[in-house]
C-alpha cells in the first residue's frame, strides 16, 4: 500500500461515469503529429456556442453575397455581427483562455473582432462609409485592403492547422478563399468592372457559405462523422497468495510493460469515443489458466503498443485504455470464478465480489510517508479529510483506495471509496516527465465518509486495528510484494527499451563512416554489438534474480497463508530475509533499467532522439518511478544484512 505512483466493497458503492470533454484543441487530429497537450480543464469549454455563432453568422452573410432572393444589403445582419458574433465569440474566447485553450482563444477573438469591425463599417452612426462621400473608388479599394489583411490573418490559422486538424483546415481554407474573392470583388468594383465584381462577390459568398456549413455541421458532429485518423470530435483487502501467485504476477507485469512499450509499428490508429470497441466481443470470455492470462496480457499489450508513443505525447487521461483493460478481463484476473473472475488465487470475499462483478478499476490516494490525510470517527463511519500530493489512476478509476492517520494515534487506515464521491477532488496537475498517463497528480479529500466495516484490518466495534491481522509480520507482507512488482515494472520498461531500440538499430541506424574500420551496416559495428550484448547479459541476470525473488515470496505465502493461526507463525526474521531478496531485486532492476534506457541512444543514433520516435519515454518512465523511494536505502539495508546480519524493520517502503 505504501506507494504514491502505483495503485494498490460494499455492494452499494456506485459505478463512476465519466463524461466526455468538449475542447476545440482536441479535434479530428492526425495521430502522427506530436501535439502539446492542452492544460487540464476545470471548466467545460464553450466551443459549441462559438462554433455555432461563427457558422450561422457566416452563412447568413454569404446569402447576401450570393444575392439569394435578391438580397444584397447586409445591414440587417449588423445585430448578428455585434451581439451574436462579436460579443459571443469574444466572451467565449475568454472562457477558452481560462481553461488553457490558447489556439481557440486566438481564433475566436480574431473572428469576433472581425465581425465587430465589419459591423462598424456598415453602421451609419459610425460614419465610416459616409466619410468617403461619393468617392466609391477609394471606398472599394479601402474595403479590398480590409479584406486582404484579414485574408492574410486567416491564412496564419490555416497554416497552424495544416499538420493536425482536418475540420479546421477545411474551415480556414474556405474562409480564406471567401475573403480573398470578396477582396477581389471590391478591387474589381473600384476598377469599374461591375460584372466581374458581382461574380467574384458571389464566388466569395459560396466559399463563405461552405465554411459556415462546415462550422455548423462540426458543432453537431461525433467521432464517426469523418473517417480520418481522429481522437476526438467535439469532445471525447490484502491478497491471500499461494505458491504460483508471485511468479504469475512477475511475468504478467513484466510481460505487459515490455510488450506495450516496444512495438515499432506506425501510429496511424483511430481513437474516437470507443476506439477499442471491437475487442469487447473478441474478448467476451475470460482465460481459464495461467498461460491463457499471459496470452491475453500479450494481446492487450500489443494493442496498446501500436500508438504508445503518440498517447504519451498527448498526455490525455487514459479512459479508453482502462476500458480496453476491462474488455480484456485483466481487472478480474485475481477474482474468484463464481463472481466472473479468473480464479487466479489472490484475494478476499466481499470486496472481490464488488470489484469483480462490476469490473471496477481501482485508483489510490495512498502516500503513507506524509500524515496529510486525517481520519475522524463519525458514528458508524470513518471520515477522511486532507490532501495527498500524489494519487495513482484516480481520475480514471471507479474506486479509490484512501489512506490516512486516525485521530490522536499513529495508526493508518486504508479503505475503499467510490471515486464519484463529490469529496474526492482531483487537481489534474500531473505534468511530470514520465508516467504521463498514470494520472498521479494531487487530490483533495473533503469529508469522504466510509463505513467502519470498510476500514481494512480494523475492529469496527473497538475502533482499533486488529493486532492478530495487522500487528504480525504476515500483516506487512504486502509491502515487499509491492516492491517486487515495482522491480518488474523496471524490468518490463528496460526490456521494452531494448526491444524497441533493437528494431530501430536494425532498420534505421547507420554505420559510422569515420571510424577507420568502416562497416556497411550498423549491426556490424563492434561497439553496437558489444553494447547490446552487455544489455542482454545484465537484463537476463536481472530477470533471473526477479524470478528467484518471486519464488521466495511464493514460498512464504504458500507456507503461511490460511487462517490467522497459520499466519501468526511467520517470524520477523523470515519476513526480513524475504525483504532483502526483494531489496536486491529492486537495486539491480533500478540500476540496470536506468542504464539500459539511457544507453540505447548510444546504439541508435542522433535521429532516435526525435520525439516522433518515442524512444525517450522508456527512460522518462523509469527515471520517474525509481524516485518513488530512494534505492540508496535499499543498498544500506543490504549492507547491514551482509555485514551485521540485520534484517530491516518493516516500514511503508520495506
Image: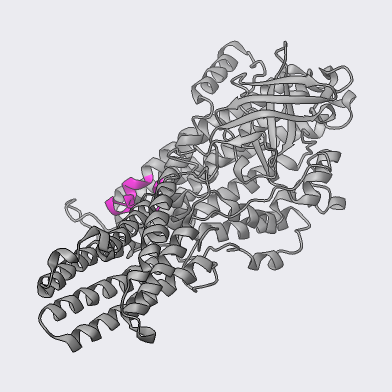
Q: Is residue 28 left or right of residue 290?
A: left
Q: Nearer the viewer, residue 115 or 488?
A: 115
Q: Is residue 324 left or right of residue 353?
A: left
Look at 37% across and 79% down and name the residue there.
63
Measured from the top left, where is residue 612 in percent x and y?
36, 56
Measured from the top left, where is residue 255 in percent x and y?
59, 50
406 is higher (above) or lower (below) than 557? above
274 is higher (above) or lower (below) than 450? below
| Residue 336 seen in this snapshot | yes
Measured from the top left, where is residue 206 in percent x and y?
34, 81
Image label count: 0
Check if residue 369 falls in the magenta segment: no
Residue 309, image quadrant? bottom left
Quadrant location, the C terminus: top right
Check if residue 608 falls in the magenta segment: yes
Look at 79% across and 48% down and name the residue there.
356
Q: How is the image coloured?
A: one colour
| Residue 613 seen in this snapshot | no
Quadrant location, the N terminus: top right
Q: Is residue 516 left or right of residue 558?
A: left
Q: Which residues are magenta?
A: 600-616
Q: Nearer the viewer, residue 66 or 31?
A: 66
Measured from the top left, where is residue 124 in percent x and y?
26, 63
522 is higher (above) or lower (below) than 41? below
Q: Nearer the viewer, residue 15 or 141?
A: 141
Residue 431, image quadrant? top left
Residue extending furthest toward the bottom = 195
Amino acid at each position: 500500500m505504501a506507494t504514491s505512483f502505483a495503485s494498490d466493497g460494499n455492494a452499494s458503492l456506485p459505478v463512476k461515469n465519466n463524461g466526455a470533454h468538449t475542447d476545440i484543441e482536441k479535434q479530428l487530429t492526425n495521430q502522427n503529429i506530436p501535439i502539446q497537450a492542452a492544460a487540464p480543464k476545470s471548466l467545460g469549454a464553450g466551443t459549441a456556442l462559438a462554433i455555432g455563432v461563427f457558422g450561422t453568422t457566416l452563412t447568413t452573410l454569404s446569402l447576401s453575397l450570393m444575392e439569394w432572393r435578391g438580397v444584397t444589403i447586409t445591414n440587417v445582419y449588423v445585430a448578428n455581427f455585434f451581439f451574436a458574433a462579436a460579443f459571443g465569440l469574444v466572451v467565449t474566447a475568454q472562457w477558452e483562455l481560462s481553461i488553457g485553450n490558447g489556439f481557440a482563444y486566438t481564433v475566436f477573438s480574431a473572428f469576433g473582432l472581425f465581425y465587430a469591425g465589419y459591423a462598424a463599417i456598415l453602421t451609419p452612426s459610425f460614419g465610416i462609409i459616409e466619410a468617403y462621400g461619393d468617392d466609391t473608388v477609394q471606398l472599394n479599394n479601402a474595403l479590398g485592403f480590409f479584406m486582404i489583411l484579414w485574408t492574410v490573418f486567416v491564412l496564419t490559422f490555416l497554416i497552424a492547422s495544416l499538420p493536425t486538424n482536418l475540420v479546421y483546415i477545411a474551415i480556414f481554407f474556405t474562409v480564406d478563399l471567401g475573403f480573398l474573392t470578396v477582396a477581389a470583388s471590391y478591387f474589381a468594383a473600384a476598377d469599374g468592372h461591375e460584372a466581374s465584381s458581382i461574380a467574384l462577390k458571389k464566388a466569395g459568398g459560396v466559399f463563405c457559405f461552405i465554411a459556415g456549413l462546415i462550422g455548423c455541421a462540426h458543432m453537431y458532429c461525433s467521432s464517426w462523422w469523418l473517417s480520418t485518423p481522429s481522437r476526438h470530435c467535439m469532445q471525447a483487502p490484502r491478497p491471500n497468495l499461494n505458491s504460483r501467485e508471485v511468479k504469475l504476477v512477475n511475468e504478467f507485469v513484466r510481460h505487459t510493460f515490455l510488450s506495450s512499450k516496444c512495438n515499432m509499428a506506425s501510429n496511424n490508429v483511430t481513437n474516437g469515443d470507443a476506439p477499442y470497441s471491437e475487442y469487447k466481443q473478441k474478448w467476451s470470455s475470460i482465460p481459464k489458466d495461467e498461460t491463457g492470462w499471459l496470452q491475453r496480457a500479450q494481446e492487450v499489450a500489443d494493442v496498446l503498443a501500436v500508438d504508445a508513443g503518440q498517447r504519451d505525447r498527448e498526455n490525455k487521461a487514459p479512459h479508453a485504455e482502462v476500458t480496453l483493460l476491462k474488455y480484456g478481463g485483466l481487472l478480474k484476473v485475481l477474482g474468484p470464478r463464481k463472481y466472473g473472475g479468473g480464479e487466479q488465487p489472490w484475494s478476499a470475499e466481499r470486496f472481490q465480489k464488488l470489484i469483480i462483478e462490476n469490473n471496477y478499476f481501482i485508483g489510490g490516494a495512498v502516500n503513507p510517508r506524509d500524515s496529510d490525510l486525517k481520519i475522524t470517527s463519525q458514528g458508524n463511519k470513518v471520515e477522511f479529510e486532507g490532501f495527498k500530493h500524489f494519487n495513482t489512476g484516480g481520475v480514471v478509476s471507479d474506486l479509490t483506495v484512501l489512506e490516512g492517520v486516525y485521530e490522536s494515534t499513529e495508526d493508518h487506515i486504508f479503505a475503499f471509496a467510490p471515486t464519484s464521491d463529490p469529496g474526492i477532488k482531483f487537481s489534474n496537475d500531473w505534468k511530470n516527465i514520465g508516467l504521463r498517463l498514470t494520472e498521479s497528480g494531487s487530490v483533495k479529500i473533503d469529508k469522504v465518509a466510509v463505513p467502519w466495516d470498510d476500514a481494512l484490518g480494523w475492529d469496527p466495534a473497538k475502533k482499533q486495528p486488529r493486532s492478530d491481522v495487522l500487528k504480525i509480520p504476515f500483516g506487512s507482507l504486502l509491502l515487499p510484494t509491492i516492491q517486487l512488482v515495482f522491480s518488474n515494472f523496471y524490468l518490463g520498461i528496460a526490456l521494452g527499451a531494448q526491444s524497441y531500440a533493437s528494431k530501430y538499430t536494425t532498420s534505421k541506424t547507420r554505420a559510422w563512416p569515420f571510424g577507420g574500420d568502416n562497416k556497411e551496416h550498423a549491426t556490424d559495428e563492434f561497439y553496437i554489438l558489444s553494447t547490446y550484448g552487455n544489455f542482454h547479459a545484465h537484463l537476463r541476470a536481472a530477470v533471473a534474480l526477479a524470478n528467484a525473488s518471486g519464488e521466495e515470496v511464493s514460498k512464504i505465502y504458500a507456507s503461511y497463508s490460511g487462517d490467522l493461526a497459520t499466519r501468526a507463525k511467520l517470524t520477523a526474521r523470515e519476513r526480513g530475509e524475504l525483504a532483502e531478496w526483494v531489496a536486491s531485486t529492486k537495486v539491480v532492476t533500478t540500476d540496470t533499467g536506468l542504464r539500459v534506457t539511457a544507453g540505447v541512444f548510444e546504439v541508435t543514433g542522433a535521429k532516435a532522439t526525435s520525439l516522433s520516435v518515442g524512444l525517450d519515454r522508456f527512460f522518462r518512465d523509469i527515471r520517474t518511478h525509481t524516485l518513488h523511494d530512494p534505492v540508496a536505502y535499499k543498498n544500506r539495508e543490504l549492507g547491514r544484512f551482509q555485514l551485521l546480519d540485520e534484517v530491516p524493520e518493516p516500514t511503508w517502503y520495506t
